[in-house]
Amino acid sequence: MAVAEQIRVGERTVRVSSPDKPYFPERGLTKLDVVRYFLAVGDGILRAVRDRPTMLERWPRGVLPGARIGTRQDNRGDAFYQKRVPAGAPDWVGTAHIAFPSGRTADEVAPTELAVVIWAVNLGTLRFHPWPVSAADVERPDQLRIDLDPQPGVGFDQVVPVAHEVREVLTETGLTGWPKTTGGRGLHVYCSIEPRWSFGDCRRAVLALGREVQRRRPDLVTTTWWRQQRDRPVFVDYNQMARDHTMASAYSIRPTPAALVSTPLTWDELDDARPEDFDVPTVVQRFARVGDPHAALDGPRHSLERLLELADRIGLQTPPTH
């Protein structure tokens, strides 16, 4: 293995150990290539996680053939999720204090600068899972996140018209949606909202939106929770807005051999986009060319009132957390 490299990131110097370790061997990508990718999309990844409690999905051995995710405790996987800030973290790694329904608590990483992202990447982090809240108020989401989940055998082309319908409903209720690929066959749509409502309210709002989209596109959309009862191609997964549920951030790398990236898009791009178009090398080129299509998520925040009024009109209660 090559000696460690010292990478300058803003005012910090971040040590990258084993820079030549194969991380995506089928693509010829090393650990250092992954670090350079996150540096290249730095404004985008930092926007996605800045000041948010963030779970790290760590693949310290890289994405090798047959690799699977396990738990840190049993050490039987090639990767693991880490909620608590790792031991030995530098004092400039920000944290957010989280209480879980079990009564346990954790101080999660809450990045404040790109150096924190690169430090986490050196630990093997490929996907960042930020909460839809800020570290300043972990109980009131400032993002509404809509997960369009294709059922087995359903292609991306069937998810796209559902996303357009979601956009229509959001616009009618005073919200602006921002789409991104998941790195798989699905799509996420994010909205910036005022941090005035609870997780339960936000989950009810997403379910109301899903029911309206289902009413308009009954051929494509279901909001039925139980998998065996879903009889339509695309599930609007409202439970992703439950407390302690997270999505992989924009610019996270999916841990599969192709190294596909969860990529922000414009609505005009959506019809012609394909998930396989967006991998580590192509997203670096794309970011240099067009920047971050989600930059405006940092702009004005909007009200959930009209979506919650829709929920009231159709008699929706706060759905149970699954």
Image (tube, rainbow, N blue to C red):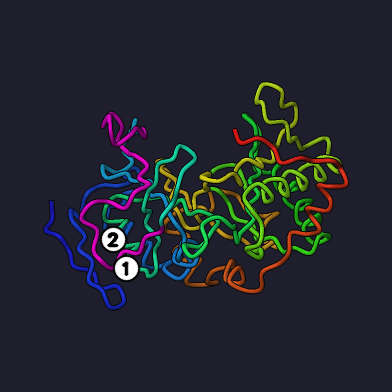
Q: Whole-percent x and y of residue 13?
A: 22, 71
Q: Amino acid at mark 2?
A: Trp
Please give the name of the residue rendered at 41% of the width and 55% of the height, measured from the top-left corner: 97
The crowd level at tag 1 (other Cα within 10 Å; few <14, some 14-19, many 20+) is many
Q: CA distance from mark 2 to mark 1?
A: 6 Å
Q: Secondary structure at mark 2?
A: helix
Residue range highlighted in magenta? 68-96
9 horizontally vs 304: left or right = left
- Residue under numbered circle 1: 115
61 horizontally vs 147: left or right = left
Q: Amino acid at mark 1?
A: Ala
Q: Nearer the viewer, residue 55 or 316?
A: 316
Whether residue 71 is situated above or below residue 277 in the rendered picture: above
Looking at this view, name the residue that lies furthest to the top. Answer: 228
Q: Secondary structure at mark 1?
A: helix
Tell whether position 172 is magenta: no
Q: Nearer the viewer, residue 116 or 137?
A: 137
232 horizontally vs 20: left or right = right
Which disc, if any, is residue 119?
A: 2
Q: Whole-percent x and y of residue 58?
A: 33, 46
Residues at discs 2 and 1 in contact (Cβ within 8 Å):
yes
Q: Is residue 233 visible?
A: yes
Q: Nearer the viewer, residue 285 or 235?
A: 235
The crowd level at tag 2 (other Cα within 10 Å; few <14, some 14-19, many 20+) is many
322 horizontally vs 95: left or right = right
Q: Whole-percent x and y of residue 199?
A: 62, 50
Please give the name of the residue rendered at 21% of the width and 60% of the height, measured from the top-left corner: 16
Q: Whole-percent x and y of residue 134?
A: 51, 62
Please give the name of the residue rendered at 66% of the width and 73% of the height, measured from the top-left corner: 300
Q: Main secondary structure of the magenta part?
A: loop
